[in-house]
Amino acid sequence: MSQKGKKQYTVLIAEDDPDIVEVLRLYLENAGYRVLAASDGVAAMEVLRRESVDVGLFDIMMPRMNGYELIRRVRSVSSIPILVISAKKEDSDKILGLDLGADDYLVKPFNPLEVLARVRSAVRRSYDLSGAAEDRNPESVSYADLRIDLAAMQLYKGDREIDLTPTELKILLLFMKNPGRVYTKVQISKYLNGEYYDADEKTIMVHISNLREKIEENPKKPRYILTVRGLGYKLERIS
């Protein structure tokens, strides 16, 4: 049961292994989440069309529609946080999943407690953005020609809407609130997840690369998000 007075978030698990589904369901329901399950991507899309879903937990290797195609289709209609749980562990597999719009990527076999922690982090960064900027402005955060509407969780560059994943939005919000400050990959990971995992370094690099592709005129010569060699990243001060 969810705690009284708090929203009960719904997690959709797309996974064709019933044993994995049951383990995840046990931990998530015990933590107060509502859990829906689908055995493949086609069934998952059907669930998304008829149910209100807050977080997606998707396998990659599934019948009928694999996880990569599922991520692509979900991203065309929704900005819900998506976490991949897959036996595909090569960097190229992770980068593809993140490039398609996943917010996080965990490799099987996994610790269910880590999955639960990642789901909690996804909920915080996706649905608690407004509280993260109360000291600046309750409605939006702006820097140069970038503006994040916190109520709509939408980035604008000038008058143009730019679609970001919840994780990309949270990273950019961190930079926009503290222009010129250098953040290491460990600091960014702890800001997103509450702690640092060894696998997070590559994930952060991919998110930064994707942010640059979306907000920079020339991602290879970034104007906004700069790499500070040997340290991390910062949002360049623009006069």
Image (cartoon, rainbow, N blue to C red):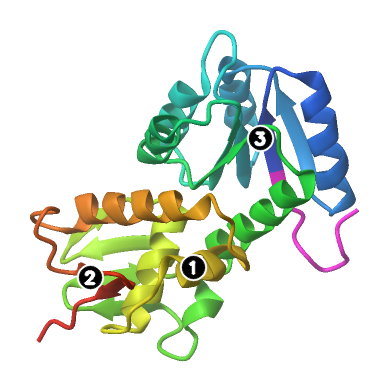
The earlier-in-sequence mark between 1 and 2 is 2
Residue 186's label in the rendered image is: 1
The quarter of the picture where the C terminus appears is bottom left
93 to 228, vertically: above or below: above
Q: Image check: 86 left or right of 31?
A: left
**Relative to residue 26, is residue 86 drawn left or right?**
left
Confirm whether the magenta stretch covers residue 61. no
Callout 1: 10 Å neighbours few (<14), some, many (20+)?
some
* Dot placed on the residue nearer the N-terminal end, 2 or 3: 3
Instruction: Locate residue 230, reporting x and y percent.
Output: 30, 70
Amino acid residing under circle 2:
Leu
Please report the bounds of the magenta region as a residue range.
1-10
Q: Residue furthest front?
A: 230
Q: Amino acid at mark 3?
A: Glu
Q: Which residue is mark 2?
A: 146
If you read the primary sequence from the N terminus, does the residue marked by circle 3 or circle 1 appear first?
Answer: 3
